[in-house]
Image: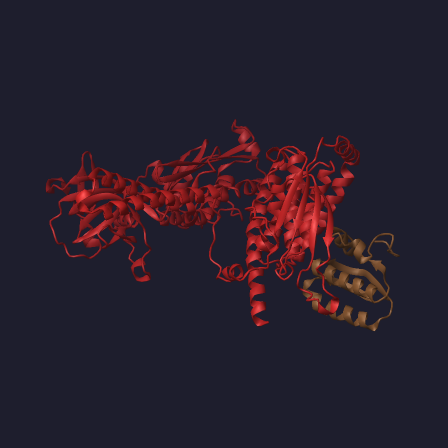
Amino acid sequence: MATMTVRMSSINAALLDTFREETTDGLEQLEAKLLELLARPEPELIDQLFRVAHTIKGGAGTFGMTQLTRIAHRMEGVLDTYRQGARPTPAAVTTLLEGTDALRRLLAGKGTSDVDDRGLEARLEAASKGGEAGAPAHAEAVRTAAAAPAPPSLPVHTIRVSPAPGLFRAGADPVMLFDQLTTVGELVATVDLSGVPPLAELDPTTCHLAWSLAMTGGSAEVVHALFGWLDELCPIAIETTGGPPPAIAAPPPAIAAPPPTPGPAAPASGPAAASRDAAPAASIRVRLDKLDGLMNLIGDLMTTQSTLCALGRAGAAVVDPIRERAALDELERLTRLLQQSALQLRSMPISSVLNRFPRLVHDLAERLGKQIELELTGDTIELDKTVLERIGDPLVHLLRNSLDHGIEQPDVREAAGKPRVGRIRVSVAQRGDEVTIEIADDGKGLDTARILSRAKERGLVPAGRTLSDDEIHRLILLPGFSTAEQVSDVSGRGVGMDVVVRTIQELGGDLQLRSVLGAGSTMTLRLPLTLAIMDGQLVKFGGRTWVVPLAHVVECIQYSAKDVTVLIGQRPMYRVRDAVVPILDPCERLMLPITKTHDLVLIVEANGQRRALVIDEVGARQQVVVKSLSAQLARVDSLSGAVVLGDGSLGFILDIVSLCTAGADRAAA
Amino acid sequence: MVLSGALTVEHAPQLKQRLLAQLEAGAPVQLHGHDVSQLDGAGAQLLYAFVRDASRRGTTTRWISASRELVEAARMLGMAGELGLTEEALAWRP
């Protein structure tokens, strides 16, 4: 019995995870569609919204999350009035958005929350009443119109539902499942009770029921999607008659889930249940085409492997060198493709981060009394999951800054001859192995005079030093700097920009700032596509091989003593054509013995700062797989990671950002 | 017999014991279901086994009242008729 309990709870946990993942997606859709609703109150959109809310409600109900169910139910009620023809109002949409927030909070708290949602529930209730009272005549008209022209031929699906005995124990409830189906089509359920044993012998938690459902309308895909997450706990078989071809009839499923293989009822099998017992790990959703691509490559790899094996078996005497070369080339090509393919599995579209922006702009603009149009481009570009997870908050911070400090009040804009509506453009683009994210606004721009006076007040600029506009702009990135006259809870506390910069640097990227007073500011983030694989330049000094991220390498030149300039009280500089670059001896920095005369100078750049690294030898450029450093080595701030080199030895990656910045401190000191 | 609250899988073992005791008593049963807040598949299956077994033993069962939640869930499962939860059968309509 004890074993049983363990298994039950772990199946529940696995299902709950699936539910939470899917509901998180559902809430994102809900929010995005709600933001579209005022501009485009079309029946199709309203239906989609209703379906998403309904699915969330159903799922929450099966897991006994009553508060979540209740709020989703009330939201559904409001949306239903729109289905009946009432027009959405801005106030009601704001309340619905608050509803999605509450659902998100409840989902995170496994259905419970410390926040009292009764006020919200009352407002939702009022919105559903108001909506209906608001437009009764119109509502009637729409209802009649909807009823009048019956579609020429609706498909009829016969769905055989054969639950496994463990269905109830897994926390799945047929009432909720069928209720969800009623949002897709009209449903008539016929129950098969022949398997129900006498009451005295009945295990009350074992399912002995089966159903045949007749559903008119909707599509088989949606049914599969609704039942999909139950897998073998609730196999279904669908037969469809009538209706247009499925490709046209199928609306996109509200929540995409891979269709399960329909089959006869099977009890939850041991291995399947056991696999769910595994400890929860961070998971990622992978598009099927990516996995298919990977499978194809593996197929090709096996072919090449057997070719090479055959060549090997044939013996040295008869090996055809051309064929062998071709097979080895193919092996190299496939390995490279496999690497790319594996990396793609880790990448996710940046839309998962940008999707939060419309809501943020909507809410903040409302609070600040500003009018703002947000334009998002390039949101399908994919980034490594780790980068995405860490870049969300910095991006939000930058966007808030644009909204709060950049865009002016409508009257101020008008007086300045600008349109009342401010524009913020967030564009993402991929160049080679890096991604740039640009946040541009047409607001008031950075006021260099004010920044400078504030910086001087705070002792951030040495007296008598003249700074260029660019340098002044960069001052706002320093810790503790803020020019907001009024500290608001939106931004302006002076914490953040330095954190943003640090996060971006930790990810191997950088932040650039352009601003024109009166015309607006543009912040450009450059980020590596992935953290796990990097293009590196191998170099040798101190008797070891090191890796310099290629993105930071400017050029490599022959060392010549006559190009070294030493000024009194300054670090030695290296002359590169018309410019001088501070010299950095990595051996000295890493406290390594100097084993060889320096022969070469590698010019590197980070955050607009260049350094001349004196090295012994320069090696190949190659892609390296980055390994993280052990806790002890991670404290060495000149190193950012380790790699296993081609000959099996270990190499370290130089942290050029920290080397350049640390050098600057010393240079200034 | 008064049924109330959630007739769901979590409470199914207790519900079974109550129904079984009622069945074994052998007297005609009047069911009061106006306080039922939820019925799920497991609850419906128990109620069905009870109603069916009672009828096999010649004991009559009759719903005196039923909440909207109870009736709607039974309908959704296609079991309203089998449970005797049809509108005609109900003395008190939800």
Coordinates of residue A67 in the picture (x, y in percent): 67, 56
**Which chain comes out brown in the rendered image?**
B
**Could you say which quadrant of the image residue A321 lies in?**
top left
Quick one: A520 or A203, which is closer to the camera? A203
**Residue at (58, 58) in percent of width and height:** A109
Report the quarter where the N terminus of chain A lies.
Answer: bottom right
Quick one: A667 or A68, which is closer to the camera? A68
**Which chain comes out red in the rendered image?**
A
Quick one: A119 or A661, which is closer to the camera? A119
**Could you say which quadrant of the image residue A550 lies in?**
top left
Task: Answer above or below: position of B56 versus A511.
Answer: below
Number of dots carrying numbers: 0
- Residue A490 visible somewhere in the drawing: yes
Quick one: A200 or A320, which is closer to the camera? A320
**Residue at (53, 44) in percent of width and height:** A356
Coordinates of residue A120 in the picture (x, y in percent): 68, 51
Q: Give the residue furthest to the right.
A: B91
Coordinates of residue A518 in the picture (x, y in percent): 46, 32
- Residue A572 visible somewhere in the drawing: no
Q: From the viewer's perspective, is A339 left or right of A600?
A: right
Coordinates of residue A333 in the picture (x, y in percent): 30, 40
